[in-house]
Image: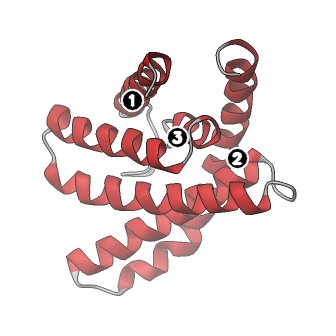
Amino acid sequence: MSAKKTMLISLFVSVALIVSLLEYYIPIPIPNVRLGLSNVIIINAILIFGFKETFFISFLKAILLVIILGNPISFIYNFSAGFASIVVMYIVNKFCSKFLSLVGVSVLGSVSHIMVQILISMILLNTKTLVNFIPFLGIIGIFTGILVGILANYMYKILRGNYVK
């Protein structure tokens, strides 16, 4: 791995971590809902590096969040949902980029992230009633996915023009 690639991956991990931490300070009236702004970094990692490096970035971010915030249960949610989201966004971007923009890729990633978190909650809490939240959280996922997709598109244009060839 080249020094430039190592530096860029380190930078992506750092920025994703900082954005994730700052997101805790954005007041949202719905408990435990986040905008997912660190996915701007993850989407750009998919575009620039590919699956393996993006997985590594997401994994390091999840581990560092646990170390900083001291909540090991959050690792189960963050890592599992993040992994599913990366898989969905990578596959959709690879095979459907002619039909879907980054906003579409982001929306599908956001909704898959939410669905996996609900599934994990259902397993950990041993309840099926959380299915009732799918429509509401799905709508939120669509809106946050649109926001993240727009920001990711803007960031990619800057990176592609200035830092990545």
Nearer to the camera, 104 or 140: 104
- The crowding category of the residue bearing disc 1, from other C-alpha atoms within 10 Å (few below 14, some 14 to 19, many at least 20), is many
Residue at which label 1 appears: 13
Residue at which label 3 appears: 42
- The crowding category of the residue bearing disc 2, from other C-alpha atoms within 10 Å (few below 14, some 14 to 19, many at least 20), is many
Q: What amino acid type should be assigned to the residue bearing mark 1? A: Val
Left or right: residue 87 compared with residue 95? left
Residue at which label 2 appears: 146
Disc 2/disc 1 C-alpha distance (Å): 22 Å
Q: What amino acid type should be assigned to the residue bearing mark 2? A: Ile
Q: Give the SS element for disc 3.
A: helix
Residue farthest to the right, as pictured:
98
Residue 89, percent from left and from top: 61, 56
**Image quadrant in which you'd find residue 97:** bottom right
Mark 2 in CB contact with mark 1 (< 8 angstroms): no
Residue 27, percent from left and from top: 44, 34
Mark 3 in CB contact with mark 1 (< 8 angstroms): no
